Amino acid sequence: MKPSASRISAATLSLARMIIAALTLPLTAVAAPYVPQSGAEVVETLPRRSEAASAAVLRRRAQLAVASRDPALAAAAAQRYIELGRATSDPRYFGYAQAALAPWWHAAAPPVPVLLLRATLLQSSHRFAEATRDLAAVTHADPGNAQAWLTLATVQVVRGEYQAAVRSCGRLSALAGQLASMTCLANAHAASGQLAASERLLALALERSTVSRDSGTDVQDASQPALRLWALTLLGELAVRRGDAAHAEERFRNALAMAPGDSYLLGVYADLLLDQGRNAEVQALLRDHLRIDGLLLRHTIAARAASSTAVPATPAVASAMTELQARFDAAARRGDAIHQREQARFELHLRQNPRAALELALANWQVQKEIADLRILLEAAHAARDPAAARAALAWRRQHGLEDGKIAALARQLEGGA
Amino acid sequence: MMFALQSAVRSLAAMILLPLLFAAGAAHAHKPSDSYLTLRIGPGAEARQQLVVDGRWDIALRDMDFAIGLDLDNDGQLTWDEVRSRHADIAAYAMPRLGLAPGCRLHVTGQQLERHTDGTYTVLLLQGGCEPGTLFAIDYILFADLDAQHRGMANVEVNGRTRSAVLGGDSTHFAAGGGDGSAWRQASDYLRHGVWHIWTGYDHMLFLLSLLLPAVLATGWRAASADVLRVVTAFTLAHSITLSLAALHVVALPGRLIESAIAASVAIAALNNIWPLVQGRRWLAAFAFGLLHGFGFAGVLGDLGLPQGATIMALAAFNIGVELGQLAIVAAFVPLAYAVRRTWVYSQLMVKGGSAGIALLALVWLVERATM
């Protein structure tokens, strides 16, 4: 079978290349070099500088330029860039942060603050094994580092190492406030078969922290708003998995009131709306956030579903798909594979190419094991009529007793048809 | 009716608005920083020794602003005047960070703009060359001190062949040119493809084996090796002819037809071992069907993508690769088969049974390829 199989894939490959070329052609045609008509023409809008913040960044840059090997200065600058990167979902800031840490980037044993930030950057580029290695070194050198335990637990959950994550959260609970510990634990436990209990405990902890907010008992007071946002978002996600859409929506809306531009939150809320077929609301929600690939993806899926009466994609959807393809191509040229989950959804829901979606989802599953990763894998396997491809992931789901309404339905379909 | 009209109006509005939205830069992607370096390197017109280099280098305005500050009035908006007034500074900042090898030089002959997915880029138009005897090389360090995740996407065309590289981080070096070295490397690439193709192209291999299985049954070593030699030479000659004709676009046949016919040829060759029709002149069958298989090889060569201006050499290298791969199969199979040819296991189980298996597999391929 090998020769015909290999030749079929060569043929589909060249077909895929042709499709990509056809899709990106309009874009490259638009993108020919040009000279503006007038000198007053605005040719680029720079990222919004919140004045004080950018002044602080500039000051740090100046300090760092004189003393680039000062670990405290470098760590402070890197931390600021990482915060900016998180707040704006703009990966360029992670590059700036990495540059600040350059003297220690390949060092075997950098100072602890540098090591912690290096781990954070490695995590953000999905290099989870290296991030875990650095975090283990931090917790070894500084067992009282709450941030390190929390980050470690998060990475462990993403990789599906729930027991290890629970242990890390245990270490955190001795160092941090109740809300931080409970959120950490709920995140780890909920994935491993204790969904309802985790949700109840987390809701309780959040309620209590609201009451005692001003009493100053929490160690990490400064991070309290961020922590509450995380807890509330997670509570919403847990409700989604339990099938309680009403509660989930209420929590997402409350969280949005705290952080209207949080891209992760917008993503999970949009997914809930997409599942309910509320496509117009998805489009309204994400309209101003199309810079972010994952949100442009959901916006386009909603736009396509809303116009499903028109058989081919509308020009607007086609244009957005071209844009998405160009962004995935740009990432692929760099050798980045951090968008595989989004790209699998793109192939499945927009390009209607379950085979390609399944391949991406399987590759992604090797790297990260969150609910969304499992879901796209099962959806792609189902659409590609290849239940065998999902067998390992389904076994993994059973082994961990993972609870999720949508996943359970997909698993029944796949196992029934296997 | 009313509703249909409304939705038509709405989709019309969306159609006009959305592309504009993207073009106007309201929704540029958030992505890591990249620059795009496109160069063409070739021999000069008059002095044959000298390399001529030209091309362009696209660098994001946002990144240039972060490095040297372009937004003179600090309003977050870059006008063409602001950018234009800093053209000299942009070139002075960027060019040393391209790290051209000694003996090579590149001048910025002008700057324009281009839109990429994440915003507007300045396009440095480049022209220059390298002194005789020097190798074109760069050591890319643009923004290395500011953004450790910045990468330069290099596409360098050397004598018609394009090489791509992602520069920055831990791999900043890129070298090209020195004509002979790259040509040799290209040939060896195609040679490897040829060997690999015959080894992994099970249909070609099984066809060859079907012809070789009975060849060693001839009386005596001399007769047997003569038969093997005839079969292999005929097959080689035939597929070389059609491979060349197809690769040079003299003859073109539909791929699906060829693939189906190849499957059929394998089935016929195998069945001939069980119910012999052609006995003494297997080399004739090898020649006739070899013509078919050559078209199949040409399809693979086409998929690999032939470099312009190097077709003949690539073709020859690929062909030699196929022959070498084929000889390796013969060298491994024939002595073994010759040693056991008198046994019942060989004459019945291997020749008859093996051929039946091959024929069955080939028929499955035939059905698959004909119905695909």
Image (spheres, rainbow, N blue to C red):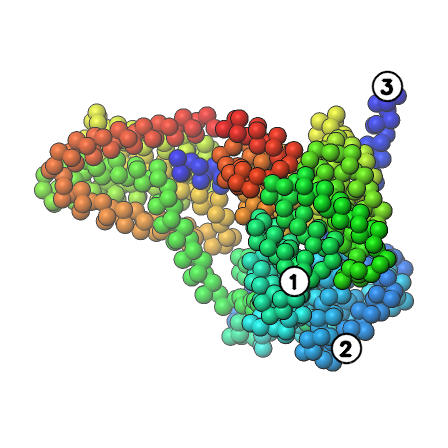
Judge by depth and name the residue closer to the eye, A392 or A162: A162
Q: Which mark is residue B1?
A: 3
Position of A336 with respect to A265 (left or right) is: left
Amino acid on which the number 3 mark rests in the picture: Met
Q: Which residue is mark 2?
A: A63
Mark 1 and mark 3 residues within 8 Å of each other at the beta carbon:
no
Q: Residue at x 80, y 50 (%)?
A: A208
Q: Extreme left residue here?
A: B220
Q: Residue at x 81, y 55 (%)?
A: A225
Q: Which mark is residue A136?
A: none
Q: Residue at x 55, y 30 (%)?
A: A414
Q: Quadrant of residue B289?
A: top left
User: Which element is circle 1 on?
Assistant: helix
Amino acid on which the number 2 mark rests in the picture: Gln
Mark 3 and mark 2 residues within 8 Å of each other at the beta carbon:
no
Mark 1 and mark 2 residues within 8 Å of each other at the beta carbon:
no
Q: Chain of mark 3?
A: B
